Image (tube, rainbow, N blue to C red):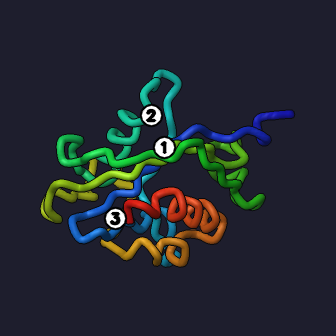
Amino acid sequence: MGNKDKYRRGVGVMLLNGDGKVFVGARIDNTDEAWQMPQGGIDDDDDDEWATALRELEEETGIPPHLVERVSATPERLKYDLPKELRSKLWGGKWKGQDQDWFLARFLGTDADVNIATEHPEFRDWKWIEPSDLPELIVPFKRELYRQLLREFADYL
């Protein structure tokens, strides 16, 4: 069993604004109309998933940690598989997909606190959407994971 059978460890954040809408960004490297929530990989020296999630959120959205309140987390990691045609193109072909810790968080700031023009931008656009619209806006291979997140966090949405 080689690296191609392994999953990259990661984190993701479902960030809600005061109106109960979810932050999504359109990736710079994807010209399709696919949107996603902030997420990223866990480095070998990261041992606190929530701290990693806050770091990734700030790197992708410019939102500082003091404007984010943790609400909940998935009880177990959620996985998705990359389509076979993408496996050789992403992450140097090392991973089959991702195995992620997901957090639900409340955004305490205003839209003016969002700045996707970060040092290493990942999004070309962003918006707030209804949680129920998430599965239809994400790339097809992540839809089931997003549906699972909606079920996990249903009590808070």
- Is label 1 in a helix, a strand or a loop? strand
Measured Cα–Cα span from mark 3 to mark 2: 20 Å
Measured Cα–Cα span from mark 3 to mark 1: 15 Å
Label whose residue precedes the other's in the sequence (1 or 2): 1
Q: Residue furthest front?
A: 155
Query: Alpha-carbon neighbours of circle 1 within 10 Å: few (<14), some, or many (≥20)?
Result: many
Q: Is residue 110 left or right of residue 42?
A: left
Q: Please tell me whether residue 107 is drawn above or below residue 126 in the rendered image.
A: above
Disc 1, disc 2: CB below 8 Å? yes
Q: Is residue 118 left or right of residue 12?
A: left
User: Residue 33 shows which numbered tag?
Assistant: none
- Is label 2 in a helix, a strand or a loop? helix
User: Residue 11 shows which numbered tag?
Assistant: 1
Q: Please tell me whether residue 127 is drawn above or below residue 146 in the rendered image.
A: below
Query: Alpha-carbon neighbours of circle 3 within 10 Å: few (<14), some, or many (≥20)?
Result: many
**Where does label 2 land, which residue?**
49
Q: Quadrant of residue 123?
A: bottom left
